[in-house]
Image (cartoon, helix red, strand yellow):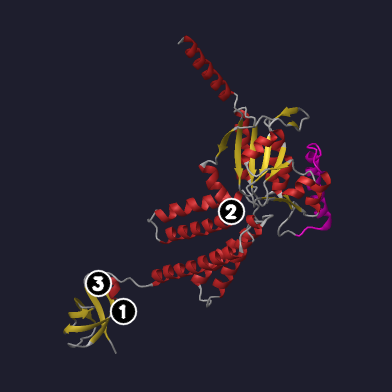
Amino acid sequence: MNRLLSVLILACCWTLAGRAQQPRVIVVHLNDTIQPISADYMARGLDEGAAQHANAVLIEINTPGGLLDSMRQMVSKVIASPVPVIVYVAPSGSRAGSAGFFLLEAADVAAMAPGTNAGAAHPVVEGAKIDDTMKQKLENDTAAFLRSYVARRGRNVQAAEDAVRSSKSYSDQEALQLKLIDLVAPDDATLLNDIDGRTITRFDGSKTVLHTRGAQLVVVDPTLREEILDRLTDPNLAVLVLLVGGLLIYVEFNTPGTIIPGTLGTILVLLALFGLNLLPVRYTSVMLLVAAFALLILEAHFATHGVLAAAGILCLVIGALTLVDGPIPELRVHLATALSAGLAFGLITVFLLRLALRARRSKVLMGGDAMIGQIAVVTQTLAPSGQVMVNGELWQAESATPVALGEQVRVRGLRDLTLLVERVP
């Protein structure tokens, strides 16, 4: 009995020891453009790996690229991470384009899934006209930044630089043959098993042995704040939220006291401005949007037969289309979004403004003041006082000259509850 108990205790101890020694890998899913919110999310994953003393941080990416400044921040975080960083382009069909290629090459272990590609990392200045000297300076600076850490990782510097200077893109097998990545693996488990026991050289020159076989995967999910702000960094959504918010604020000004449209509109405008603040915005486009609002308001006040409205809608569409100066299509406002949002917002705004002005200019339809100018029929001879019927109502009336029964009179004023009338010629 004692021997059986000893065996059970020993087995439990071995089990607990095995669990305690199980490797731990932090997983970050970067399926997004490279911009400040995705940079913050990745940095939080690296900090989590350091806090938990994980064996590695696995960054699984699928990105078309993004902003150069955000990419530099992310590369710096990867290089400075105290925990080994694995960047894995996955699943099949994914890519590490443009800025994503820089992130892939910065990793301690670079890997790709079958059917993925990486590269096309030439820097782009969208919409801006720069001379050849400035263009060459930007290209040289970006290439030098890539070389500064690719060489220390022991990878192919020339092939990496070709992705910047010649916009070359590589499949998984091409990247492996050119020594731009360390291995190709079909899934996370295979990747971690394949690199288990591998000795890597960290950026500071120290040697580390990876222990990742059968690792416990701890996924770091985006917070609610990061998810909301990440959606708002989509320029198309940000522009739509901005225009809808502006329209709701106008409704509040037109019908004060409703509260809800004004409150909701203010929140939407602030959210849109916060999202746009994270993106490269053209100030000339902002001026176009301001000019568009001014032209739409003038159209409602002056009869220009739609000329000002057309000019305002044109400014609105062009301003929205060129508002965000993104280096990749995913960080620009699409033409369909600018056209649909600009036309809809412009037409709705002009319609509401005309309704408001028409209501303000129309006569009062209630009370005694509404009677002025109305035609009444004499029901009791006015000599000079009597009764008249106007709008189906009997009123006491007074005329400067006698008016016979059945004749028509026009209301020209009101004194107390007596209408002042005159005979209709």
Q: Quadrant of the N terminus?
A: top left
- For marks 1 and 2, give the CA distance: 57 Å
Label pair 3/1, CB-CB below 8 angstroms: no
Above or below 57: residue 102: below
Tell me the quarter of the picture where residue 103 sits: top right
Residue located at (21% from left, 71% from top): 417
Q: What element carries label 2?
A: loop
**Residue 321 lies in what quarter of the image?**
bottom right
Does any portion of residue 151 appear in the rendered image? yes
- Local packing at callout 2 (Cα closer than 10 Å; few below 14, some 14-19, many 20+) is some
Check disc 1 and give the amino acid type. Gly
Residue interval drawn in magenta: 129-156
Is residue 252 shown left or right of residue 376? Answer: right
Task: Identify residue for label 1.
Answer: 373
Residue density around tag 1, few if under 14, some if 14–19, many if 20 or more, within 10 Å: few
Question: Tag 1, which secondary structure?
Answer: loop
Residue marked by disc 2? 234
Amino acid marked by disc 3? Arg
Say which quadrant the C terminus sits in: bottom left
Is residue 135 within the magenta segment?
yes
Q: Name the residue under label 3.
A: 415
Q: How far apart are marks 2 and 3 (CA)?
A: 64 Å
Reply yes or no: does residue 214 show up in magenta. Answer: no
Looking at the rendered structure, the secondary structure element under dot 3 is strand
Residue 255 versus residue 60 in the image, above or below: below
Q: Which residue is drawn at 83% across and 53% down?
A: 136
Mark 2 or mark 3: which is in front?
2
Counting residues from the start of the chain, the first of labels 1 and 2 encountered is 2
